[in-house]
Image: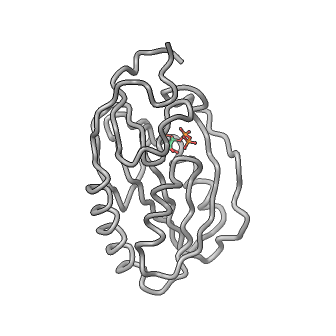
Amino acid sequence: MKPTNHSAPRRVLITEEQIGRRVRELAAQISADFPEGPLYLIGILKGSFVFLADLARAVTTPCRVEFMGISSYGQNKTTSGQVRVTKDLDVSIEGRDVLVVEDIVDSGVTLSYLIRVLEQRRPRSIHVAAMLDKPDRRQRPVVIEYVGFTIPDEFVVGYGLDYAEDYRNLRDICVLEDVSVPL
Ligand code: PRP
């Protein structure tokens, strides 16, 4: 049976408290690196929404909050390699300092595509903040200036991350034990 409605076995990998502490550290670093603002925080839907909300309130730099929708996974557990823009920015980023906010960087396919797209819009700078980095699965080289946690190659949910749209609202980051279960 497919694991829906938060019924699948899972174990806590990173607690809410650990996440909170790390977000404050990252925010202090970002605030020091961008004292002036406005810093354009670009949240990549949907997974970044929790991290973005926490980070935006923890930085002291004046920020603008924008969203972009990029999807390459669909209902699958691994990237299809086909990246799709599901929602574009509503504003110009020309001459702006941009911070892309991601929940996780896995293969790097999404981020490398996104950086290419954003660079064409001539921002002053582009940096990346990702709550999770899973370098073991990297297919494209990407630079992530602000990493929350580097994690092993396990399927994680919570803190914005989903499995078939479930689990995004878990407060901890958890490993879904039975990833062999077909959707
Ligand atoms: C997830 C995540 C990243 C991307 C990372 O998005 O939010 O955007 O995958 O994977 P990659 O490094 O292998 O490209 P997903 O497509 O699952 O959409 P979601 O954020 O709506 O869950």
Residue at 38%, 73% (x, y): give it: 30
Residue in the foreground of this view, choosing between 107 and 162: 162
In this view, 48 is above or below 27: above
Along the line of sight, the residue nearer the viewer: 91 or 46: 46
Residue at figure coordinates x 32%, y 68% from the top left: 24
Q: Nearer the viewer, residue 146 or 160?
A: 160
Q: Is residue 65 left or right of residue 28?
A: right
Measured as percent of width and height from the top left, residue 180 is found at 40, 16
Q: Residue furthest bottom?
A: 36
Please state if 21 lies on the left or on the right of 66 as rendered.
left
Tell me residue 27's x, y (percent). 37, 71
Residue 50 place in picture, x, y as percent: 48, 55
Count of labels shown?
0
Q: Is residue 63 left or right of residue 179?
A: right
As drawn, which residue projects farthest toward the right? 90
Of 169 and 71, the residue lying toward us:
169
In the displayed structure image, the side of residue 74 where residue 175 appears, left or right? left
Residue 143: % across, % down = 40, 55
Could you say which quadrant of the image residue 183 lies in? Answer: top right
Q: Residue at x 27, y 57 (%)?
A: 17
Q: Is residue 82 above or below residue 33?
A: above
